Amino acid sequence: MQATQTLSGSSLNVEAGQIVSITLNGKTYTATVQADGSWSTSVPAADLALLTNGSVTITADVTDKAGNPASATHDVTVDLTQSALAIAQSLAITN
């Protein structure tokens, strides 16, 4: 991995300004929910370089202002024999 990558998703029924915690390969990144429910965060190239071939789980956690937690997971396959990593599906958090 030679470049920073963006992880993005959307949340339903979660207020703007709430913080989403995204966990990938044991590291946690944060993003802020926008007015339209979208969120995104950057994963540095150095962190991506630590990934190995195989399945990796991405987890996104958020809590609404009332304190109700929500979580979503998505498994992706890392294939270092290809020239790029692509994640075709978005994570959606419904609370």
Image (spheres, helix red, strand yellow):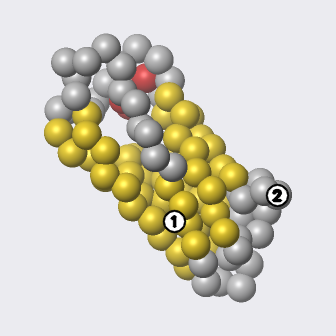
Residue 51 x %, y %? 26, 33
Instruction: Check disc 1: other Cα within 10 Å, few if <14, some if 14-19, many if 20+.
Output: some
User: Would residue 24 appear left or right of 79 to someone viewing this image?
Assistant: right
- At x 62%, y 44%, the residue is 40
Residue 90 x %, y %? 51, 49
Residue sitting at the far right: 35
Element at label 2: loop
In what quadrant of the picture does the C terminus appear?
bottom right
Q: Is residue 65 above or below residue 40?
A: below
Residue 26 in view (yes/no): no
Residue 32 x %, y %? 70, 53
- At x 37%, y 55%, the residue is 74
Residue 58 in view (yes/no): yes
Q: In this view, does 3 lie above or below 59?
A: above
Please tell me the numbered disc located at residue 35.
2
User: Would residue 52 appear left or right of 12 to someone viewing this image?
Assistant: left
- At x 22%, y 22%, the residue is 80
Of the numbered discs 1 and 2, the one sitting upstream in the chain is: 2
Instruction: Check disc 2: other Cα within 10 Å, few if <14, some if 14-19, many if 20+.
Output: few
Gap in angstroms between the C-alphas marked 1 and 2: 18 Å
- Between 80 and 50, the residue placed more toward the observer is 80
Please tell me the numbered disc located at residue 40.
none
Kind of residue at disc 2: Ala
Q: Judge depth for marks 1 and 2 and give the one in front.
A: 2
User: Would residue 88 appear left or right of 63 to someone viewing this image?
Assistant: left
- At x 17%, y 39%, the residue is 54
User: Would residue 15 appear left or right of 45 to someone viewing this image?
Assistant: right
Kind of residue at disc 1: Asp
Residue 23 x %, y %? 42, 52
Q: How many labels does the image show?
A: 2
In what quadrant of the picture does the N terminus appear?
top left
Please tell me the numbered disc located at residue 61.
1
